[in-house]
């Protein structure tokens, strides 16, 4: 199996796919950043924190390595050990500056090396560091950071958007293959880790104790009195009753088998459909994982899909 | 000619042998690791020397062992040598030198434990070109067994959960570890089975791992035990990568499987922005019991109520998390509610009939909040302008499954002054 891993890892890939992946990532990041106001973090004392290690109790999912030291180092918030925290205006400035950098990178790709994408990563992790330090978890963004790092580490050049036609017609390349494999590894590792967490955190019979219909019903009732919300369409799930408890178990199994997708990439589209439905269903319990539906665009074999559609239309 | 026989896998032993720089003093010095020369190890065992409690020096026709060997070498050094100062007393050992050497032996045991290495095995039959008991797979297995034993003792003695079962299992695992450490038990066949057998053996490993981790009650402890179970697999991946490294086209990618295994199994991993996967959860409500929901409510001068939408606190759009941060730093609920009102006051100009503040740039196309929020922008009419708010409360609603509120309990109440004043910490800039 390990030798197979190397074989599949080193497959050639399409620069067209890599370019599109970059556009997906940039689109999502701009979408999310423009829907948030990071100046908010200047409205309360910088010292008010709940680092990841503080979020859960010791007997629960404690994040042992989510300490202030490691988190501040990795999010560049160590600069505030020496410098005062920024004002709301400065944070908003960083936010808009980041949007500009992302837009430039989306259009022009790498300009004289990786400094642009490196700056994007630094600004992004700095802004999201406020979120992580304040007690919120990954906020549906861990996968995007992973994809971003894969693109930054692309040993080939991230090409400008004007190269879309030429990359579509071009031959597969080794470096593009590495990027595709890395992005798929990010996806598989994230979901597989979640699957293993289900094994460690839940006893076997507890796999069937998440009653989705009940959770949806509760959320629908809550939305009458609180600001939480679940779309009305999920009322159709309510008649399922206890049978809906099977859905969670099916999802957990899918997490455990997702590594197969790395070796059998023809299954990617099928897994995408499954995970799109799964992440859509989480809306029913009032949780948005919109980004994790879009992120599959980074790993789908879009070049093959589009060229197949093109051939069919020509035929 | 001097020959020194030592444990080549003991870091300090190896460094000591180099440090001594005896060549300049005694001429030819031959260093032999007893792990690579089991025939020499057998010879010394036959002479009654326990080679795991000391090293051996052969010099000028005499054999020195352990502390005597240490003293003999020390005497050959210059008087100002640091090592010699550790072992004073001329040709005799003295109690201090004897104690120092014993501590070094204990240190070596500790170092071997930490590396997952066993004691020297005089019956070692390592095949040519393999690492044998020094393979990372076997090291992972030893360390995994030790970690599980330590986790059991934590459950038994510290957490005091299931003490009888935990202590019994601890004894089983610690005895198992000792057998592995002292090489009475060999892992070579198991290692070969995993490395060359079918992938379905992983299912067997999984079954064994689950049967171990389900002995633990706390999730955090189960995850530690699972990491112990995963260490042998990490070792297999490292051994594979080391084997590949010798090939001409080896790249960084050979280390990916080992890295992935560590990421998915390390307990409580959180290296921003990455973490070790979403934890498992179950439904905690039952249809035959009502459930509770905490809400923040603002009341205006007319006594009308409006919900404080958690979307006002975006980017912190996971409900309840920001309040938890405030409480973590001993700020009162009252202070948090005043902060909520201040935030509402600050954002009020951005609320339109159709859009909440986070939708001010992209409208309805804005990326949703993590916990979905109702778009109740129209509720915040002029009747609920910030200056009209006289009170902000945190309430707990008890609701039945028919959607009826059975009880309302006010948890925290903050009366605002006639100007809807603030006393929360002021924003910067």
Image (tube, coloured by chain):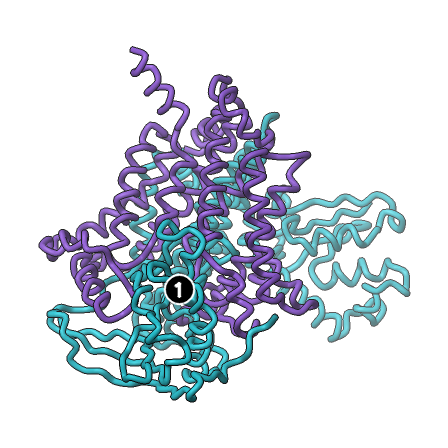
Residue at mark 1: B351
Residue A99: percent from left, percent from top? 54, 48
Pick the quarter of the image with the N terminus of chain B: top right
Residue A75: percent from left, percent from top? 58, 58
Callout 1: helix, strand or loop? loop
The purple-tinted chain is A
Q: Chain of mark 1?
A: B
Residue A71: percent from left, percent from top? 56, 61
Q: Is residue A130 above or below residue A297?
A: below
Q: Is residue B85 above or below residue B131?
A: below
Q: Is residue B206 above or below residue B155?
A: above
Q: Quadrant of residue A187?
A: top left
Nearer the observer, B166 or A132? A132
**Residue drawn at (61%, 25%) of the image:** B248
Nearer the observer, A257 or A23? A23
Chain B image colour: cyan
Residue B214 shows in this picture: no
Residue B152 shows in this picture: yes
Residue A310 shown left or right of residue B117 in the figure: left
């Amino acid at each position: 199996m390990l030798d197979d891993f190397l074989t599949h890892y080193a497959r050639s890939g399409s620069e067209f796919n890599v370019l599109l992946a970059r556009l997906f990532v940039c689109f999502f990041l701009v979408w999310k950043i423009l829907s948030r106001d990071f100046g908010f973090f200047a409205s309360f004392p910088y010292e008010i924190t709940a680092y990841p290690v503080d979020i859960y109790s010791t007997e629960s999912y404690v994040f042992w390595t989510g300490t202030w030291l490691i988190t501040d180092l990795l999010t560049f918030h160590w600069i505030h050990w020496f410098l005062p925290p920024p004002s709301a205006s400065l944070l908003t400035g960083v936010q808009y500056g980041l949007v500009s950098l992302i837009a430039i990178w989306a259009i022009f790709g790498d300009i004289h090396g990786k400094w642009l994408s490196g700056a994007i990563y630094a600004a992004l992790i700095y802004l999201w560091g406020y979120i992580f330090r304040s007690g919120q978890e990954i906020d549906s963004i861990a996968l995007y950071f992973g994809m971003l790092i894969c693109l930054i580490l692309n040993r080939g050049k991230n090409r400008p958007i004007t190269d879309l036609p030429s990359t579509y017609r071009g031959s597969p390349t080794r470096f593009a293959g590495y990027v595709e494999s890395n992005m798929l590894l990010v996806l598989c590792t994230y979901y597989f880790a979640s699957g293993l967490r289900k094994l460690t955190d839940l006893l076997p019979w507890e796999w069937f104790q998440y009653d989705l219909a009940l959770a949806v019903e509760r959320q629908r009732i809550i939305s009458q009195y609180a600001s939480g919300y679940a779309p009305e369409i999920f009322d159709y799930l309510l008649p399922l009753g206890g049978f809906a408890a099977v859905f969670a178990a099916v999802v957990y199994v899918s997490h455990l088998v997702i590594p197969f997708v790395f070796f059998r990439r023809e299954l990617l589209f099928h897994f995408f459909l499954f995970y799109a439905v799964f992440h859509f269903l989480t809306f029913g319990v009032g949780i948005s994982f919109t980004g994790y539906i879009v992120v599959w665009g980074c790993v789908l074999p879009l070049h093959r899909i589009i060229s197949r559609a093109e051939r069919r239309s020509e035929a | 000619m001097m020959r020194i026989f030592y444990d080549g896998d003991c870091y300090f032993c190896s460094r000591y042998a180099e440090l001594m720089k005896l060549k300049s003093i005694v001429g030819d010095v031959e260093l032999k690791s007893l792990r690579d020369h089991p025939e020499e190890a057998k010879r010394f065992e036959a002479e009654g020397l326990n080679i795991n409690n000391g090293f051996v020096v052969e010099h000028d026709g005499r054999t020195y062992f352990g502390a005597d060997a240490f003293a003999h070498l020390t005497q050959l050094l210059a008087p100002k040598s640091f090592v010699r100062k550790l072992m004073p007393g001329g040709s005799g050992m003295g109690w201090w030198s004897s104690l120092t050497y014993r501590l070094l032996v204990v240190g070596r045991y500790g170092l071997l434990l930490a590396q997952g290495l066993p004691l020297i095995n005089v019956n070692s039959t390592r095949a040519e070109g393999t690492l044998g008991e020094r393979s990372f797979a076997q090291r992972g297995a030893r360390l995994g067994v030790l970690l599980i034993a330590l986790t059991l003792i934590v459950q038994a003695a510290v957490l005091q959960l299931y003490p009888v079962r935990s202590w019994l299992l601890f004894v089983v695992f610690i005895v198992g570890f000792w057998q592995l450490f002292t090489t009475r038990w060999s892992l070579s066949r198991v290692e070969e089975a995993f490395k060359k057998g079918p992938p379905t053996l992983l299912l067997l490993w999984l079954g064994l791992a689950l049967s171990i981790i389900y002995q633990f009650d706390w999730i955090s402890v189960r995850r530690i035990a699972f990491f112990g179970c995963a260490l042998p697999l990490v070792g297999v991946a490292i051994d594979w990568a080391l084997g590949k490294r010798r090939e001409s086209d080896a790249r960084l990618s050979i280390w990916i499987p080992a890295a992935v295994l560590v990421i998915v199994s390390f307990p409580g991993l959180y290296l921003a922005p990455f973490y070790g996967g979403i934890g498992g959860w179950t439904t905690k409500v039952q249809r035959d019991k009502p459930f509770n929901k905490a809400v923040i409510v603002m009341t205006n001068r007319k006594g009308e109520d409006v919900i404080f939408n958690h979307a006002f606190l975006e980017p912190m759009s996971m409900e309840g998390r920001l309040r938890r941060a405030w409480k973590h730093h001993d700020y009162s609920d009252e202070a948090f509610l005043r902060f909520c009102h201040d935030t509402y006051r600050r954002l009020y100009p951005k609320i339109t009939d159709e859009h909440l503040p986070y939708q001010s740039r992209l409208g309805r196309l804005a990326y949703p909040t993590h916990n979905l929020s109702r778009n109740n922008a129209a509720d915040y009419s002029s009747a609920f302008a910030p200056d009209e708010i006289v009170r902000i409360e945190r309430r707990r609603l008890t609701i039945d499954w028919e959607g009826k509120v059975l009880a309302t309990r006010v948890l925290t109440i903050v009366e605002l002054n006639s100007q809807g004043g603030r006393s929360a910490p002021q924003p910067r800039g």
